[in-house]
Amino acid sequence: MRTIPATRRDVLTGATALGAATLLRLETAQATPASLEAAIRDVVGEAPLKEGRVKLAIPPLVENGNTVPLDVEVDSLMTAADHVRTIHVFNEKNPQPNVISVKLGPRAGRARFTTRFRLADTQTVVAVAELSDGTFHTARANVIVTIAACVEELG
Amino acid sequence: MARPIINVPAKARRGQVIEIKTLVSHVMETGYRHTETGERVPRDIITEFVCVYNDEEIFRATLSPAVAANPFITFHTLATESGKLTFRWTGDNGFSETGTATIEVE
């Protein structure tokens, strides 16, 4: 019978790899400030983010994280020459950093949308708007959540 | 399945900015929840929502599991001409739902 040679080094290398894999899984299980920044960079690239012009309205204190009202408005004339192209919303601590991305145009008349979303924890929410001149504007909001979404078990 | 709820003003002046409200029933299962026995509940969400006004796309949203169950989305558009607005939601497991509304523009 042949045995698989297992030296001390093999075992240690295996253990390290396993450890790294576990760490990696832990990292991907929750959106972190780093993954939030990465998700934002996916959209804006190297472009600078300017504060202002974006109004992100979320209640500062939310009892139920399963349905949180979200209202984003960008100060724009919405003309063919000057309008909002896209608005993206990100979060810091849900399992994924993305919430919703919307595509608008001068036909929108008004750069505003609302929806309801989930928050797994007390955290920061970020809105990023891409304007027709290629600039990016941003706003942040801090939300305190009493009952978290996403993590509960099914009854 | 319950029909989507769509709210579009029946009449508008030409050039007026109108608000459109939509709600579609869907569980929006995140894929991050587990049953009591520890099994992961597979993801089942709406991933895309599109609104077309007389053959022209006026609004599109890409949704993630963070959007709450029964996605409710409101947005705006310019009332340009009388006609039809078509709304389409698509998602995991071949989910597809459409709705329409008509508008009269004076």
Image (spheres, rainbow, N blue to C red):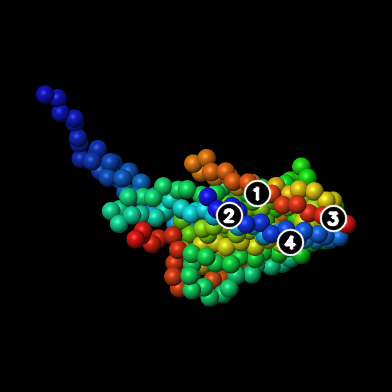
Secondary structure of the residue carrying numbered label 3: strand
Secondary structure of the residue carrying numbered label 4: strand
Secondary structure of the residue carrying numbered label 2: loop
- Could you tell me if the residues under marks 1 and 2 are in contact, i.e. CB atoms within 8 Å? yes
Disc 2/disc 4 C-alpha distance (Å): 17 Å
Label 1 lies in what chain? B
Disc 3/disc 4 C-alpha distance (Å): 14 Å
Q: On the same chain: label 3 and label 1?
A: yes
Identify the residue position indicated by label 3 in the image.
B105
Please name the amino acid that badge 4 sits on.
Glu
Q: Can residue B61 be seen in this view?
A: yes
Residue farthest along the bottom direction in this orientation: A61
Identify the residue position indicated by label 2 in the image.
B24
Residue B105: name its quadrant.
bottom right
Q: Which residue is drawn at 71% across and 64% down?
A: A73
Q: Could you tell which of marks 3 and 2 lies nearer the N-terminus?
A: 2
Q: On the same chain: label 1 and label 4?
A: yes
Q: Residue at x 83, y 51 (%)?
A: B82
Q: On the same chain: label 3 and label 4?
A: yes
Please name the amino acid that badge 3 sits on.
Val
Q: Could you tell which of marks 2 and 4 lies nearer the N-terminus?
A: 4
Identify the residue position indicated by label 4 in the image.
B19
- Would you call the spot at circle 1 few (<14 residues within 10 Å), some (14-19), or many (20 or more)? some
Q: Could you tell which of marks 1 and 4 lies nearer the N-terminus?
A: 4
Label 3 lies in what chain? B
Q: Residue at x 76, y 60 (%)?
A: B9
Identify the residue position indicated by label 1 in the image.
B99
Residue A8 locus on image (x, y percent): 20, 40
Residue A19 locus on image (x, y percent): 32, 49
The answer to whether B68 appears left or right of A8 in the picture is right
